Amino acid sequence: MGGLDELLRRHHIIICAGSGGVGKTTTAASIALRGALAGRRTVVLTIDPAKRLANALGMRTVGGSGSVVTGDDLQPGMLTAMMLDQKGAWDELVERHAPSAEVRDRILNNHFYQHLSQSFAGSYEYVAIEQLCELHASGAYDLIVVDTPPTRHALDFLEAPQRLADFLDRRVVKWFVRPYFSAGWATLRFVNRTVGFLFRRLEEATGISALVEVSDFFTSMSGLFEAFAPRVRRVYELLRSSDTCFVLVAAPEEQVLTEAEYFCRKVRELDIPLRTVVFNRTHRELTAGRQGVAADEVTRLMMRLLGEETLATKLAENFSHYEMIGRGDGLRMESFRRILPKGVATIEVPNFNSDVHSLADLRAMHPFLFAA
Amino acid sequence: MKPLLEKLFQRRLLFVAGKGGVGKTTTACALALIASQLGKRTLLTEVDGAGRAAYLLGVEPAPIGLPRRAGPLLSVMSVEGGAALAEYLEIILPVKRVLQAVFASRIYKYFVAAAPGLKELLTIGKIWYEAERLEESGGQRLWDLVIVDAPATGHSLQYLRMPHAAHQAFGGGLVGRESKRIVDLLVDPRVTAVNLVTTAEEMPVNETLEMYEQIRDELHMPLGILFLNRMHYATFEAKQVDNLERKLAKLHDARERAIATEVMNRGREEAGWTAINHRYSQRLASEVRMPRIEVPFVFAEEFGLKEVHAVVAAIVRDSAGSTRRGAVHGRA
């Protein structure tokens, strides 16, 4: 046992981060399956996986309550999959935090809220983290694996809750919105001349009625999130604790690695425990580090085996194409390894020639993810 | 000739959208190169990116909000909501000293970073501004064509939805009216087209189908071309590769066997992806009513300007209706 098995034993929470399109969802599901097979009560919090993967995980319907995954030597009840609903993320936040039914309805019926709630950034990430905290507190699981939302930047997942907390900070709302609407111009001029000027222009520009609605929205929201800032602080404490570790999922592509490099730097600043980098969908040269295999040697060998020139040539040509990718992947991964902080392990999972859509497929990743 | 592309380039504002990691930036760069070669003064804008488009075109990225020349008729620009707000405020608040105080204030920074939808609205606003922008001498438009390398699916939809939302929320005020002008432009089939990029495999195709429906039925935006990127076209059958397996046993030389095994595995990989691509390409054909262009997988050590040119060649070839397909070499 080694590699990720060590992480599974030591940590209760494994967070799979990475930019979009690198295979976070399948990696998270595969890690969770390993945990469950090792006899730990495991839950994977996932986001909109491919339909057939969702089916394999027993998630035929969308819902936050979770479905028990069966099959493939799994002991009953060992693996639960939960899917977050991106569309209803804000409504869920409001429902969860509203101090009374009246405040809840006031917000849900707010004109401004209704039009904008689908476009709010950051809420989805916050709901994911909130769910994580609840699962952790419930004590119902030995292992929680989190698949982070498909943002372009891996860091959004970490920064969104703080941004949201900043925005809903009572003090900010108090300075920025409330005085203007509750006490009028005189107060505002004392509070902040600059903001006063800005608001006069904004009022002229937008028309007062809209701003009243906006003000009402923020005032209700800030009341709603009374306990928001301390909650976010606790979230970050949990993310930094020894219970938690981060796995960065990356692909050996230049764009993805540039992003991953930034993530690694930022993770150190934020004091987040990054333990492992998984390179997904990799290719390797057959003779890495040495002189490549000469094309005509391959063609001759294929001729000898197949006795057919056209096919031999085609297969040899295909081989050389993949050697070319393998060479690039290898070089990029090597240079990425050099910038990684000490103590961060790297794992390579090769490119499979099929989609991952069953528990057996998830298991096929195990020899690579959990190689000693 | 290339009727499909020429029709597309008659519009002025082209979005290139799709799931993360499917090759949106590459496709947007290729379209921008083709358009500029056809004589269109083209601006390629990258939303919230790290200057990747500029690098792919072989130039250093310019500061956010400023164009960088990347060819005779081609410029590339990064767009970001915060910078766009600063630019907008400079237009409506012409007093420098006040502006500096606004920008320096903590509240302003909080507000721009976190205000729901503000960043998205301003980003689209900036793109709209560039699409409508006139030359300093007046009269003519500065750009014939603005191509937008959009963020990943979920985020693209957030951006594209914002003007609708703002228009409905703010009604008759200035913000409402400006938003309405943006919406009018976005839904006008003579001006705008949303192009979708996907790879032909399960997850990206699911997202593409979802996005297709939302753009058509919810945002009512005109659709352009569907790009199937990174298509594999194996020149041999999977079962031909399987024949190799039995013959491996005859090889006694370890090196030869290692090579032959690898040739077999890579052959299976290529045949496997070809089958998957074929299956999902058919699914797209039955569910998406958009003209499509297929772009073969580019085998290369590194993906740079040469490889973008390989994609350009593939797009031009396929849009002209040629059926010639096969592996593409970035290094050729």
Image (cartoon, coloured by chain):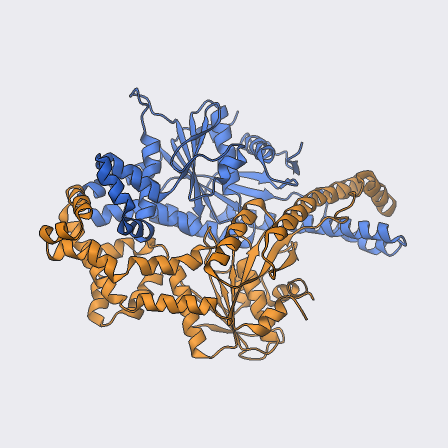
Chain colours: A orange, B blue
Q: Is residue A230 above or below residue B145?
A: below
Q: Is residue B187 visible?
A: no
Q: Is residue B56 left or right of residue B114?
A: right
Residue B131, image x and y in percent?
35, 32
A93 horizontally vs B244: left or right: left
Residue A310 coordinates in the image, percent (x, y): 79, 39
For the question of whether residue B303 can be seen, the reply is: yes
Q: Position of residue A322 (x, y in %)?
A: 70, 45
Where A70 sits versus A277, above or below? below
Is A91 drawn above or below residue B268 in the view shown? below
Q: Horizontal placement of B67 versus A221: left or right?
A: right
In the image shown, does A365 or B46 lie closer to the viewer?
B46
Q: Position of residue B190 (x, y in %)?
A: 35, 32
Quadrant of res A52: bottom right
* Residue depicted at 61% across the width and 55% down the height: A279
Residue at x-position 74% and y-position 48%: A288
Quadrant hosting residue B307? top right
Placement of A94 over or under B226, stated as above or below: below
Tally of numbered discs: 0
User: Looking at the rendering, in which quadrant would you find the C terminus of chain A?
Assistant: bottom right
Considering depth in this image, is B56 or B237 the residue closer to the camera? B56
Q: Residue at x 57, y 73 (%)?
A: A10
